[in-house]
Image (tube, rainbow, N blue to C red):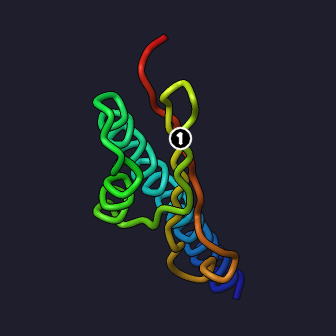
């Protein structure tokens, strides 16, 4: 009986660790998508292209996330917000969110 309880405890621990790992992976993926979107937008802003936010949205989407915001500052930098759905049992807690900023060096 003790062996069965120990096995059940170990299985539950492994499932919990896997769930947390899925949430962390979703957060990293959203962060990567935001970073790449911000870099793409900053490159376009540097040459005066007005489609920077639209291109950033395409880049973020291509990386499996959704762009939630695109703010261009007066100094030519851009801040991108992105989110990605967390799979599994933690999906009910909402998406993983991240933001990134990129711009020209001062």
Counting from the top left corner in percent of width and height, residue 105 is at: 44, 14
Q: Nearer the viewer, residue 8 or 60?
A: 60
Binning the other alpha carbons within 10 Å of mark 1 as few (below 14), some (14 to 19) or many (20 upward) gives: some
Q: Which residue is mark 1?
A: 72
The residue shown at (64%, 80%) is: 3
**Residue 48 lies in quadrant:** top left
**Residue 92 lies in quadrant:** bottom right
The residue shown at (49%, 10%) is: 106
Q: Nearer the viewer, residue 6 or 55?
A: 55
**Residue 44 lies in quadrant:** top left
The residue shown at (56%, 75%) is: 15
The residue shown at (35%, 65%) is: 61
Q: Is residue 36 above or below residue 101?
A: below
Counting from the top left corner in percent of width and height, residue 67 is at: 48, 62
Q: 34 left or right of 9?
A: left
The furthest residue to the top: 106
Question: How many tags in the picture?
Answer: 1
Location of the N terminus (image quadrant): bottom right
Q: 21 left or right of 37?
A: right
Counting from the top left corner in percent of width and height, residue 19 is at: 56, 71
Q: Secondary structure at mark 1?
A: strand
Counting from the top left corner in percent of width and height, residue 63 is at: 32, 60
Q: Is residue 64 above or below residue 74?
A: below
Q: Is residue 71 above or below residue 91?
A: above
């Amino acid at each position: 009986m003790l062996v069965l309880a120990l096995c059940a405890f170990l299985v539950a621990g492994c499932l919990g660790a896997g769930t947390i790992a899925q949430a962390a992976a979703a957060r990293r993926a959203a962060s990567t998508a935001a970073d790449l979107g911000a870099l793409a937008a900053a490159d376009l802003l540097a040459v005066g292209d007005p489609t920077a936010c639209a291109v950033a949205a395409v880049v973020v989407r291509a990386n499996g996330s959704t762009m939630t915001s695109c703010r261009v500052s007066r100094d030519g930098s851009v801040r991108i917000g992105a989110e990605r759905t967390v799979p599994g049992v933690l999906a009910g807690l909402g998406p993983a969110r991240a933001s990134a900023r990129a711009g020209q060096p001062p």
